Amino acid sequence: MKDSILNFINDYSEGLIKAGITVLVLILTHFSIRLYRRYISHTSERHRFAPQRSDSISKAGQALIYLVSVGIVSNVLGFGIQGIFVATSSFFAIVGVAFFAHWSILSNVTASIILYFTFPYRIGDRLLIENEPRYSGVLKDVTLMYLKIQTDGGSYITLPANVAIQKVITSLSKQDYQKLLEDQKKDDDGAV
């Protein structure tokens, strides 16, 4: 009996090691996802972010963790890192052609992720965007692609996330907003 167990271990040791590493990677992936979700939830509560914003960032990070785990498991199981690189480079070559015409999509998603962790504005803040023409409004929503701002007239401005990084945006206090309205009124009266 003891000899048969030792023979089994000797014959299948490589497979047992691969299976053990695979199970370990799956367990680590599970706990990494849980820690990541907890971190995003804590950050969202601390900065009072909108739930949609947190969900988008959470899904993007989870996808990255899953991709890394799949890469490790496939390498352990013998697919080899070169085979994975060939498959992913072929996939990204096809996707790259599609994104080339829409490079701003990737730029907006990246900017939105950066803004999630460094965002100085909150939903409900009054923002002044230093653009030509200048406009201001209340921040209503932040998605993976856009900031949605409602003007005083009730219209909505959809500002791409990458523009929020590139342009000067001022979060106006009530006093600054009143001063801005007075200055605009003076300019309008002087222009007539």
Image (cartoon, grey):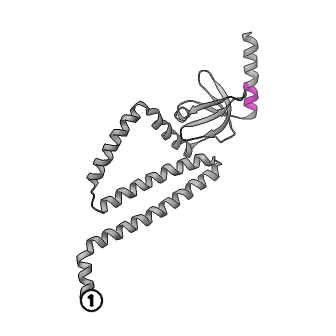
Q: Nearer the viewer, residue 85 or 95?
A: 95
Q: Residues within 10 Å of mark 1 (few under 14, many from 20)?
A: few
- Is residue 31 left or right of 74 when viewed as pictured? right
Q: To which quarter of the image does residue 77 belong? A: bottom left
The kind of secondary structure the magenta stretch mainly shows is: helix
Q: Residue at x 27, y 79 (%)?
A: 9
**Position of residue 167 measured from the top left corner of the image (x, y, whole percent):** 56, 30
Please tell me whether mark 1 sits on a helix, a strand or a loop: helix
**Position of residue 88 measured from the top left corner of the image (x, y, whole percent):** 33, 47
Image position of 71 with respect to 20: above or below: above
State the extent of the magenta-drawn residues as a range: 175-180
Q: Residue at x 72, y 20 (%)?
A: 184
Residue 183 among magenta residues: no
The residue that mark 1 highlights is: 2
- Is residue 7 left or right of 174 when viewed as pictured? left
Q: Residue at x 36, y 66 (%)?
A: 22
Image position of 187 with respect to 57: above or below: above
The kind of residue tagged 1 is Lys
The quarter of the image holding the N terminus is bottom left
- Is residue 142 left or right of 27 when viewed as pictured? right
Report the number of numbered marks. 1
Q: Nearer the viewer, residue 64 or 135?
A: 64
Image position of 29 with respect to 180: above or below: below
